[in-house]
Image (cartoon, rainbow, N blue to C red):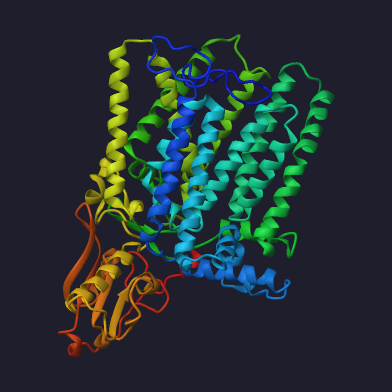
Amino acid sequence: MTAEVSKPETGEPHRSGGGVRTGPPGAGLIHLDHLFDDLAWVWLLAVAVLVVLTFREYGIIWDSEVQDEYGRKLLSFYLSGFQDRSAFEFQNLYLYGGAFDLTAALLNKISPLGEYETRHLLGGMVGVLGLIGAWRLARTLAGERAGFFAVMLLTLIPDYYGHMLVNPKDVPFACGMTWTLHLACRTVSQLPRPRLGTVLGLGLALGLTLGTRIGAVLAGFYLVLILVLYLELLRRAGATLRETLGSARRLVLAYLPALILAYVVMGVCWPWAWQSPLNPLVALSVFSHFTWPNQVLAAGVVFKASDPPIWYLPLMLAVKLPEMVLVGLGLAIWFAGGWLVSWLGDRRHGFAVDADGLRRLQFLMVTLAALFPIAYFLIFRPEVYNGIRHFLFIVPPLAVLAAVAFDRLWHSIDGGPRLLGQAVLACFAVAVVIQAWIMMELHPNESIYYNALVGGVKGADGRFELDYWGTSIAQAAEELATYVRDENGGNPIDRTYKVLVCANPESAMYFLPKQFELTRVIAEGDFFIGLTLSGCDKSVDGQQIIRVERFGAVLSVVKDRRDLKEQSVNIVKAPPQPVLTPLLPATSTPMPPEMR
């Protein structure tokens, strides 16, 4: 893509979205001062309000219980004066940072909401913070208009939005990586002397991200690579070896405050990390050889999570990202290819150490953040999990690249035939409305989304994993409570019912009145709640009275067993902890959810 000329002292582009700040109204499509910044703020406010209005409607995922307990143990470590060290022995969660869980545990001390509702609201706000990071990153790269496109595209990616309110690991990590990337790009725009405030902001973002997951070292790798390339540009521009080494020394000193602050913040969020200087490296080593002995379904193929086919991640990104994002990424490849051909064809052209050259380094860093994990997967084939949840951190930079490409398209057609511009805008607006409608229909199970390449959710049913988090169980439980109240003439429930659950029991019992009790003995079960994942809904007989579905794909069911109670003598195979694993029979012994 064509890089915009930046102001070295601020990192902001001279051109801000096709004339939106600097050019007077003319013959282009739209010219209003600050229009796209205003639209971005309105959009962000609307998303924040939507989170506040809907966070209670989301279910409890597999990992929520253990993550919640981990947060309480971390808080106890501090409240006990560092005496309660149980967090450092709690299953394997001590290998993860506790930035989100510790914050949630602290908020739950004062929150008037339920324990999980507080976590969901916090997660939603962290997700909004990630949207702001993507907006600022795209704005730094290409101006206000690109920033608005980025925040809009990222919001309309169901896997990002759906995970915001339920996923305590992957969205906080994605948010942290986005802000770290943004602030790293800002420091690059300020070279050779990045501002102390920006550097400290980078250290804070990196520390919080490392305090969520050790994989944040990737962000440091990207920045170091870009700084090495910057030094190479200096050398090519005529700097002597001594001058280049002097510049390297100044860069180390300039970024040292960020490293110190990042380590301190990481230690606060992840106290196990500083119990021994090598603990972060231990965690990194463990995760690099981590195994999850379960199976995954994709494109109708069942395979071991530890041995994924090479096509898994590219295919999942292709079918999980909305069509409009895929179009934007296609445009990004087109524009980047055109620029590369032009650059290679001009033998006199090179990279200079000026604002334009720094802008290219910023684009390269964002491209690395989006594509390096994909390349790593293709080469080393690491273990995969359900969908793209462990790769959510590359979704914001992908959305940013797509947004910059749409901005470049706008710039290309601005001033051209008016009809063409209106047609492109109309197509884009229709795509936004359709995608928003799809997400409304999926709510609150947005993460089961698949695009039209596989026929949507209905086409993916049976060929790909849908509700692997089990979030639909909450709706099934609430509808069961309503069913029993209606059966009782609308009066309060006045007797005890035994409930069988083939899913995470907490996902159902948390949303049922106290008159419902969990049982694992089939003969005792009055009702059965089960996911359709792995055929779990077929593990217990009964009359189906409720089913939760989206676009014709059934996610979970409720069965009335009261007429069959006396005939049941078997033991429910689902163990007491939430360990239902997709595509494995209930007799298997999968890893606990915190090991995923």
Q: Position of residue 462 (x, y in %)?
A: 24, 56
Q: Position of residue 15 (x, y in %)?
A: 53, 18
Residue found at the far front of this picture: 491
Which is nearer the eye, 251 or 160?
A: 160
Q: Seen in the image, is 356 located left or right of residue 403?
A: right
Residue 471 figure quarter: bottom left
Which is nearer the eye, 339 or 417?
A: 417
Regarding residue 450, the answer to whether it shows in the image is no
Residue visible at 29% across and 68% down in the picture: 478
Which is nearer the eye, 198 or 316?
A: 198
Regarding residue 439, the answer to whether it shows in the image is yes
Residue visible at 53% across and 52% down in the picture: 172
Q: How many marks?
A: 0
Residue visible at 21% across and 72% down in the picture: 483
Q: Is residue 28 above or below residue 461?
A: above
Q: Is residue 421 above or below residue 382?
A: above
Q: Seen in the image, is 436 located left or right of residue 84?
A: left
Q: Is residue 360 above or below residue 151?
A: above
Residue 196 figure quarter: top right
Q: Position of residue 522 (x, y in %)?
A: 26, 84
Residue 297 figure quarter: bottom left
